[in-house]
Amino acid sequence: MEALIPVINKLQDVFNTVGADIIQLPQIAVVGTQSSGKSSVLESLVGRDLLPRGTGVVTRRPLILQLVHVDPGDVRKSDENGTEGEEWGKFLHTKNKIYTDFDEIRQEIENETERISGNNKGISDEPIHLKIFSPHVVNLTLVDLPGITKVPVGDQPNDIELQIKDLIVKHISNPNSIILAVTAANTDMATSEALKVAREVDLDGRRTLAVVTKLDLMDAGTDAMDVLMGRVIPVKLGLIGVVNRSQLDINNKKTVADAIRDEHAFLQKKYPSLANRNGTKYLARTLNRLLMHHIRDCLPDLKTRINVLAAQYQSLLNSYGEPVEDQSATLLQLITKFAAEYCNTIEGTAKYIETAELCGGARICYIFHETFGRTLESVDPLGGLNTLDILTAIRNATGPRPSLFVPEVSFELLVKKQVKRLEEPSLRCVELVHEEMQRIIQHCSNYSTQELLRFPKLHDAIVEVVTSLLRKRLPITNEMVHNLVAIELAYINTKHPDFADACGVMNNNIEEARRNRMRELPTSVPRDKASSAAPPGEGEGTGNWRGMLKKGDEAPSSGPGSPLKGAVNLLDVPVPVARKLSSREQRDCEVIERLIKSYFLIVRKNIQDSVPKAVMHFLVNHVKDSLQSELVGQLYKSGLLNDLLTESEDMAQRRKEAADMLQALQKASQVIAEIRETHLW
């Protein structure tokens, strides 16, 4: 069991080499208010003076302190003056430099703190890593955190209290950490800020151990018996009382060893029944025991986490690819892969299937059958036409002669106008498909061929080639769709099989109109002259020019010199006005409307079927079939290899970081495997 803590220290060293804290290792986080005695507790555990002291916030960066027990005969020489010592320290940021003078360690902590946090009492969450080797310590990993404060001092920001609390919570929220809550005995335990913040993240108290400092500074006539017995604030892992060195003791250079000896004498005198369960030495043993058991409980989850991260970083490293050796082969491979993924995205067989929205071929299908189909169905066959327009077209198609039947010219004129309205949504369909083909490029770049991210110039070149190919095919496809509508306009096929029923309706209506006129003729008019009879309602005089005169006007004299009285200007164009239609006009308009609607539906059906086919042939399939040859022809050139396969500036760095992290995770996995082999777990 004792060997578990060095194992965690070894894991910490492994991850320190890559500067990562992605693994939350078991450790002891020390929490307390300013001047609660945190620093004295830590120095008592180390047995040496090594922490900066002063007023206000002294600890302004987390200090990860690893205590490593070594054999008494093991000594090290300092790098500066060659002084040997059985106790020494090493900082992560100074690499392998060895410190045997603990005053130098204290000074280095202050210098490193000011380097990052400045000298204005500001704080930083970037930790300082310090490892202490000594035969007088037990194996522990401690994190000294800034003291909880309420009021900013000096140049501290107004939210210093919130900053410190967030920093503390960040470390003690680690489920693999033990919380060492430090509270002074001469304060009310019920108002302990350390216990309060610990309880926020450790609701059931299974990770919290309380330390009561300054037992010798309580008011005369009082003691901490109830507190140490857990009667005031119960703590599951227990409460341990310690006696700190006073500032006078520190000024007088009282050693930690002497302070521990005096502490033992004080406890024996003041709390004889609790002396063996309190004090610095008991605290060190308790922390060592708790940390070992905690490590044992955390190792299974830790092993799983390391294995998962190793797999993720292996995949990430694979995506970065190996350094390019054969440029020609690499370029051809990337081009081929992109072309294949592009086509697979259209066909729906891509490796990475989008789940948030339609993409590729699925969206093209949606455009054809939902967007385009519904748009065509929403086009009203008679939209933009009114009865007066139809009647005017009929009259214009008859010329100067009144017609007995509905002229076909008027039908063709009107139906072409309506069919022309199908061209705009058809061209919009081409545009939507073209836009989706453009989106597929980005989809392939983001999901399917991450290797392209290594070579930004190659990526840009591929995008340009595909975009150019799509741009080249767009006017060709638009022209074909335009021709599909023009073909329908070129010949109005009234013999179309589906149009036969509509023609039959029209013929029946015409025959019915003829019979009605025959029944309405006067009996004095012979039936064989019915075809030349005027329609009812046209009245007397409508067959000659006199009918054009206003009522009451006389016909002008044709004799020479006779003035023209009441003549009408024949150059005036009558303006159509709303009026009630005659029964014949109503029937003619209805016939035309039915014919237009019937023929329009036939054409719309043709367009709805032919436009998607044209788009697929001239745009989608053509791009699919020619994409790879286009890419190879444009990019696979010896003069472009070096430029296209130039990696991005940060790619080499990211590959190195991923490789280092993967190596660290593999080492960590080996360390945990060694634990199994030695039956420590």
Image: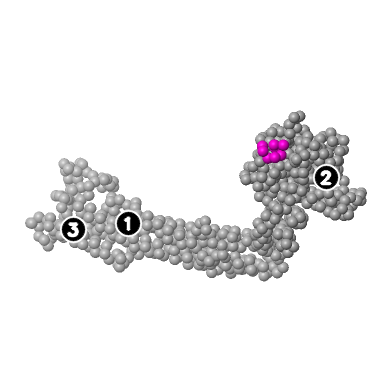
Say which amino acid is labelled 1.
Leu
* Residue range of the region highlighted in magenta in the rendering: 225-232
The three-letter code of the residue at mark 3 reads: Ala
- State the mark number for residue 414: 1
Spatial separation of the CA atoms under disc 2 and disc 3 = 121 Å
Identify the residue at image location x=79%, y=45%: 281
The reply to whether callout 2 and callout 3 are in contact (CB within 8 Å) is: no
Q: How much space separates mark 1 and mark 3, taking CA atoms?
A: 22 Å
Residue 642 percent location from the top left of the image? 70, 64
**Mark 1: secondary structure:** helix
Q: Where is residue 617 in the image (x, y as percent from the top left)?
A: 48, 67
Query: Which of pointers 1 and 2 lies earlier in the amino acid sequence?
Result: 2
Using the numbered discs, state the Cα–Cα distance from disc 1 to disc 2 in whole angstroms. 104 Å
- The residue under the point 37% across, 62% down is 605
Q: Where is residue 82 in the image (x, y as percent from the top left)?
A: 92, 51
Give the side of residue 29 with respect to residue 596, left or right. Answer: right
Q: What residue type is labelled 2?
A: Gly
Say if mark 1 contacts mark 3, CB within 8 Å.
Answer: no
Q: Name the residue under label 2.
A: 47
- Where the C terminus falls, by quadrant? bottom right
User: Where is residue 185, by image quadrant?
Assistant: top right
Mark nearest the camera among 2 and 3 is: 2
Looking at the rendered structure, the secondary structure element under dot 3 is helix
Picture layout, residue 146 above or below residue 343: above
